[in-house]
Amino acid sequence: MHAVVLVGGFGKRLRPLTLVTPKPLLPIANLPLLERLMASLARGGVTDAVLSLGFKPEPFLIAFPSNVCAGVKLTYAVEDRPLDTAGAIGFAARHAEIDKRGETFLVANGDVLTDLDIAALVAFHKSTGAQATIHLTPVEDPSQYGVVETNPQGKVNRFVEKPSPGQTTSRNVNGGTYVFEASALDRMPGVAPMSIERETFPELVKDGELFGYATSDYWIDAGRPDTYVRANIELLQRKSIHKVEAISAMSQIAKSATVTQSVIARGCKLGENCQIIRSVLLAGATIDDDAVVVDSAVMGHVGSFAQVNGCLIGVDGEVKSGAILRDAKVPDAS
Ligand code: GDD
Ligand code: MG
């Protein structure tokens, strides 16, 4: 089976981390998110994937020089301007000639980590005869997602992207993994920007061609500062299909440093008495003596006695000695 994987967004919410590394290539427990996603797709029967690229395509080409990721053969569809989600799917699917082959295909948002059984999703899709099926997952606050209302058989009655309060009572949201019949590509010409969430799904609903498949499998969209850090930490704690290396052997950690529920990548340097709590240190991060890092992701440098809480520190990020930062981005990347 072929898949289109959407990896062309700007990753704005994860700036400054994404100024150097596109969101799908950021590591989750020391392995790029995209590799973990591709491994799940491969387990579900995906053999070939087209990466739907726009912003910063080069790092992807460099990351997979043999054009294989987790056993899946890769091709690349590079947009010359952002086509938004449905535009991107239409463009990439045609690039991979999915339209010509007329086969059922899969689509995945490039920032989702889930234990969803892809083969079961595809089997459900085939059982309905619909043009499209989306994976649904329950969340407490649906305001950041596409909220979906279905009937008991799973037929979607309503799809509302990022609803305002009171717009819907459903807690089931679009999990960002879809199965499509090739015929659905007629709705996505792929030549101009178009949103799958705001245009294509509502149209499919009108025509009775959209189903939802709800599961309670582990699911997280790692595209926000808090969820990016949480996706890392939860992978250390939960039972998962994924292999995990929490602390790279290629890092230098002072004996008196304490590391609690955190991920340390290769090339990191941790000074005496520093404390790293529920945080992610990416390759090359440096934490000086007595600094405290909590609920944060760090690529750059945290000076001695600094306290950093809920922050993203980019590759050029410098936290001065003794600074106290909360919910900040360094350098400022709003
Ligand atoms: N190629 C390409 N071109 N990809 C794009 C573009 C584009 O113009 N715009 C966004 N993408 C990619 C992003 O890289 C990401 O992998 C995916 O499309 C979804 O974009 P996000 O920016 O992560 O969307 P979101 O998290 O706010 O919401 C989406 O995901 C939620 C689940 O995680 C929506 O699909 C929601 O309905 C859904 O609930
Ligand atoms: Mg997202």
Image (cartoon, grey):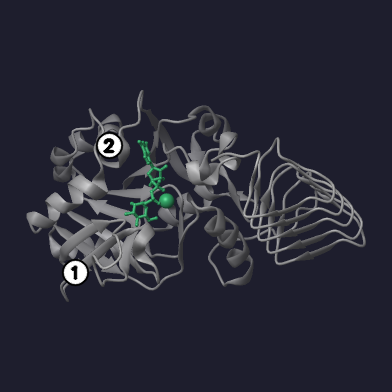
Where is residue 276 shown, x and y percent of the image?
77, 60
At x 19%, y 54%, the residue is 132
At x 31%, y 56%, the residue is 162
Label 1: state its secondary structure.
strand
Mark 1 or mark 2, which is nearer the start of the sequence? 2
- Report which quarter residue 320 is drawn in: top right
Where is residue 88 shown, x and y percent of the image?
30, 36
At x 19%, y 69%, the residue is 150
Left or right: residue 185 versus residue 51 is: left
Q: Looking at numbered disc 2 in the image, what kind of residue is underneath it? A: Ala
Whether residue 319 is visible here, answered yes or no, is: yes
Disc 1 within 8 angstroms of ligand 1 (CB): no
Label 2: state its secondary structure.
helix
Where is residue 215 shown, x and y percent of the image?
34, 71
Q: Looking at numbered disc 1 in the image, what kind of residue is underneath it? A: Thr
Crowd class of label 2 (few under 14; some 14 to 19; many from 20; radius 10 Å): many
Disc 2 within 8 angstroms of ligand 1 (CB): no
Q: Nearer the viewer, residue 206 or 38?
A: 206
At x 29%, y 30%, the residue is 95
Give the numbered dot on residue 89.
none
In the image, residue 183 sits, relative to residue 220, either above or below, namely above
Where is residue 139 shown, x and y percent of the image?
39, 69
Give the numbered dot on residue 150.
1
Work out how far the residue at label 2 is from the one at label 1, CA to CA, in angstroms. 27 Å
Q: Nearer the viewer, residue 97 or 82?
A: 82
Q: Which residue is mark 2?
A: 93
- Report which quarter residue 243 is drawn in: bottom right
Left or right: residue 144 versus residue 181 is: right
